Image: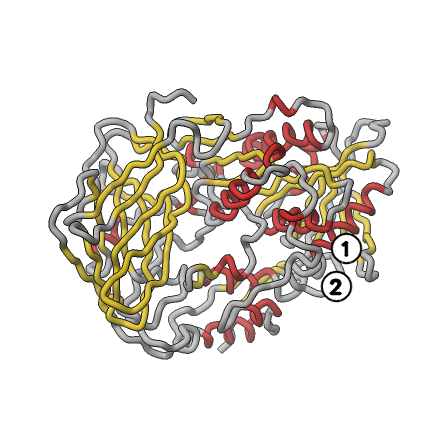
Amino acid sequence: MPIPVQRTDPSPVPESARQHLVPMRDGVRLATDVYLPETAGAGRLPAALVRLPYGKNSRYVFMDRIAAYLTARGYAVVVQDVRGKFRSEGETMPFVHEPDDGYDTIDWIIRQDWSNGRVGMFGDSYYGTTQWAAASAGHPALRAIAPRVTGADGIRPEYWQRDGITQLFGVLYYAAYWTDNRVYDFEPDLTVRPLSDALDAITEGIGARPAMWDAYVPEVSAVEAYPHGHPFDGRPIPVLHQAGWFDNCLQPSINDWATLSADREWAPLQYLHVDSIDHEGYHLDDVPIAPEHDHATVDSAIDRLLPRHLDPVVAFFDVFVKGEADAESLPRVRWHLGHVGDRTAESWPPPGARTLLLHLGDGTLSPEAPTEPAAVNWVHDPADLVPTLLEDSFSAVHHYIDESPLHERPDVLTFSTEPFAEPLDLAGPVRATLTVGTDGPGAHVYLKLLDVFPDGSAHVLVRGQRQIPSGPGSSVAFDLTHAGYRVRPGHALRLHVASSDFPMYLPHPGTTENPWHAAAGKATIQTLTTGGARPSHLALTVLDAEAPE
C-alpha cells in the first residue's frame, strides 16, 4: 500500500543572483546562479563554486546568505543544481556525471568577463563529493577544494554498506533525493516484513522507483564515480578536509586526510579541520540546542553559524585561490576538543597522544585485565530488535539523545569505567578488539562508546559495527572512528554491545536469508569472552590534559 509523500519543487531565484542555464558537453543545461559583489567595478574575481542536489535556492542550504558572506570577502559565488535536480536538465542519477559536469562548469566560469580564471570549490556532504569528482577531471583552473562532512569514497552505496551491514538511511536517501528533480519527504512503514515491501510502498507513494536502488537492493554494487581515474591519482591540489566529531560521515573525511598526508606529492597541500559538530552543523557547545539557535528554522541562527562555518574556508581560499595570504598562516590541523575549545597541531593524532587500553570485565572497563576467563551471552531476536533512539543520524548533536534507557534491556551488554577523578582527553582513533561468536549463521555486533553523566544519562561519542561469522568465538577488530573530546571529572565511559540497531541498520534475520526478503527471523545467541587468553579490550587514543596544544 502506498505511503503519503510530500514533494518539494524549486524555490524562486533570489534577487541577489542571476541564473544561467550552462550547457554541458552533451547539450544538457544546468541551472547555475551567479552572485557578484555589490561593489561597482570589482574587476575580475576568483570564483567559489558549489554544485549540489538539494535545491540551490532552498531554505535548507541558505546559499543566498552564504553567497552574501563570500561576495563581501571578494569572491564571485557560483551555485549550481547538479544534473537532473531541481532547475537543471538531464538524467537524475548521482555520481556518474559529476566529473565531466564539474569540468565543464569550471570551463564556463573562466570564460565569464567577471572571472580571473581561478576557482575553488566548497560545500558539505554530496556537494563535497562533487568537489572530488571535479578534481578527478583535472581542470587546471581548479586551485583548491574544501569538502566538508564527506569523503572521496564516502556517500556512495559502498559507504552505506560496510562490513556486511547496511545502513537503511542510504536506501531512503536515494528515494528522497534521487528519484527525479524534486525532493520527497515520507515516513516509511518499517514494521512490515519483508522489508522489501516497505520499499515498494515508497515507490508507489512517489510514483517512481529511484534508479540508484538497482545498485543497492537487494545487494550493494559499486557505482562508477571516477571515469577519469581516482582523484588521489591525479594532479595534487590543496584540500581543506572538514569534518565533525559527531558526523556519521567522519571516517571518510579522516581516511582522505590520512591517505593524502602519507603521499609525498599531496602531503604538503593537506589541511584538516575537525569541529564538535554533527552532519547538519549543530555544535556541542550549544547543547541543548535552544529554539533561537536552530538554523534549520531561524534565520538569525544562520547568521550566527556562518562565521564558524565559512571563516576556515575563506582563510584557506585566500591562500590557495586568491593567492593573497601566506600558507604559513594556516594551521596544518585544527581540531575542537569537546567541552574545552579549539586546538592546533602539525599532525593527527596530535603529538603526545598515546594509547590507553581498557579491558572488558564483569560489566567493567578497567586498565587492569581480568586474569580469569569469563563469557557472557545475549540474545538477538529479530522480532524484538534493539531500537534506534536517534531518529536522524545526521543530527546527533541537535537531538543529543540519552541512550541509557537501552542499557536496561537484556539484549544489550554494557561495560563501564568508574567515574573519572581527573579529565580524560580523547584525541584520535578509538578501536576495540572483542572475542565474540554466535550460534547462528552469522550476526551483527554494534558498539557505542558513551559519556555517562553524573545524573546517569549516557550520550554517544563514537560507534562502530561489524558482521561476525558463525562459530564459538574469534577475535574481531572494530573501528569506532575518531574522537576529540574531554571526559570531565565525575563522568564515566561506557561501552554498549548489541546485535541490532533498528531502523538505523538493516537487521540480521538470524538465518541465511537475504535480510530484505526475510519474512521472519530466528533468534540467535551471541557470546563475548573476557579475560584469560582470549581477552576483549577497548583502545583509546588519549592526550594528557596538561600536554601543550
Q: Secondary structure at mark 2?
A: loop
Rendered image quadrant of residue 546 = top left
Specify whether 203 is left or right of 68: left
Specify whether 73 is left or right of 222: right
Say the numbered circle drawn on residue 46.
none
Question: Few, some or many C-alpha atoms within 10 Å of disc 2 (few <14, some 14-19, many ≥20)?
Answer: some
- Which residue occupies the foreground of this view, 538 or 400? 538
Q: Find disc 2 in the rendering and name its residue.
A: 90
Specify whether 397 is left or right of 75: left
Q: For the residues labelled 2 and 1, say whether their Cβ atoms are less than 8 Å apart.
A: yes
Placement of 219 over or under 79, stated as above or below: below
Where residue 212 appears, as percent x and y from the top left, is 59, 67
Placement of 70 over or under 505, stated as above or below: above
Residue at left 46%, top 27%? 342
- Which residue occupies the foreground of this view, 338 or 447? 447
Q: Secondary structure at mark 1?
A: strand
Residue type pointed to by label 1: Leu
Q: Find disc 1 in the rendering and name its residue.
A: 30
Where residue 437 appears, as percent x and y from the top left, is 25, 63
Dot 2 or dot 1: first in sequence order is: 1
Placement of 329 over or under 369, stated as above or below: above
Residue at left 84%, top 31%? 44
